[in-house]
Amino acid sequence: MRKKVAVVMGGYSSEYGISIKSGKVVCEHLNKTLYEVFPIHILADKWIYIAEDKIEYTIDKSDFSVCVNKKKIIFDVVFNAIHGHPGEDGVLIAYFELLGIAHTSDTSYKMGLTFNKRDCLSVIDTYGIAHAISYYLNKGVVIDTKEIVKKVGLPCFVKANRAGSSYGISKVYKEDELKVAIEHSYKEDDEVLIEEFLDGVELSVGVITYKDKVKVLPITEIVSENDYFDFEAKYLGKSQEVTPARITRKQEKQVVEIAEKVYKILRLKGISRAEYIFKNGIPYFVEINTVPGLTEESILPQQAKKANISLEDLFGSMVENALLNV
């Protein structure tokens, strides 16, 4: 009998549209001989299953089931394709954990930790992983621009602490631009992370648990046509994504070792994609995503393809790992 897979997509954040695209790709590539696939849209105003005939069926939040033609459907496993809140920050995962439903993501705690950039940095810092000098702000505190510049220098990056897809991020060149950039970040989150600018080769590294083993995928070099790897560069074709990256074997070995170490330090499972900047012979950790983009054009699927892993195999492995770890 085919396992019933609920593919959750959407969410409540600015990444809603990207998540819908990821979710649709997952639905398309899951093996239909093994799985009965249900696209579930998790929206701020409704949770619904959208059937092939476009009819919407409301999800019963008491047990995450759905009634179709008077038949109650209980899902065997949830495939999480929600970028941002509430899928990537652990909130929705905690709900599934309470209900005892298998899911493709990590635990709610680790999802929350990795989504919170500054908390994640504080953990890896204790293990000696190199990262940018940073300055933290919470909404409502006095903004001391001179103190910020003294610590991180210029140019610097101002980021919403809990956001993805480059929403709420600015590159700042002058001190008098800082307050505007910080207010821009506060539109996405009430916590802000300000980091020094690292001038070096930008790399994206996928690390996954595939067939029950940790695997580092081929590394991607990011070459943005814009000033940095912003939303346009990520999603509107304003960048080159070169896989495998044009780095030496020694550099590749360094990055692979650091990426696998970070994955294991954080005790992750499933898929992840982390960004590093190679500066002065050292890979600097930037951030990690535990629900990265999953469309055919997204970085991690590109890397999987280079590793001869099809989307069907990648997504199927995620579902099977989830079912094994109920």
Image: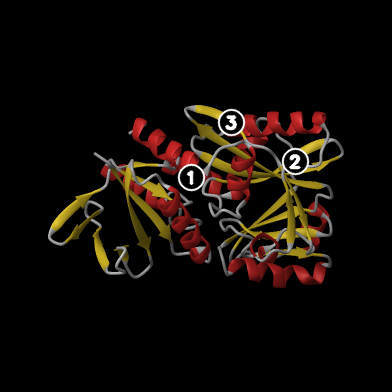
Q: CA distance from mark 2 to mark 1?
A: 21 Å
Circle 2 — which element? strand
Are the residues flagged by discs 2 and 1 in contact, CB closer than 8 Å?
no
Residue picked out by circle 2: 284
Q: CA distance from mark 1 to mark 3?
A: 19 Å
**How far across and how far down the image is residue 293, in percent?**
55, 53
State whether residue 298 is above or below residue 319. below
Point out the residue furthest to the right here: 280
Q: Nearer the viewer, residue 97 or 270?
A: 270
Q: In the drawing, does residue 318 fall left or right of residue 58?
A: right
Q: In the drawing, does residue 114 fall left or right of residue 95?
A: right
Q: Earlier in the sequence, mark 2 or mark 1?
A: 1
Residue picked out by circle 1: 111
Answer yes or no: is residue 185 visible.
Answer: yes
Q: Nearer the viewer, residue 82 or 95?
A: 82
- Give me the disc on residue 7: none
Quadrant of the drawing holding the C terminus:
top left
**How far across and how far down the image is residue 114, in percent?**
55, 44
Residue picked out by circle 3: 215
Q: Earlier in the sequence, mark 1 or mark 3?
A: 1
State whether residue 85 is above or below residue 46. above
> Residue at the spot x=34%, y=70% of the render?
45
> Residue at the spot x=58%, y=57% of the render?
164
The answer to which image quadrant residue 308 occupies is: top right
Q: Residues within 10 Å of mark 1 (few under 14, many from 20)?
A: many
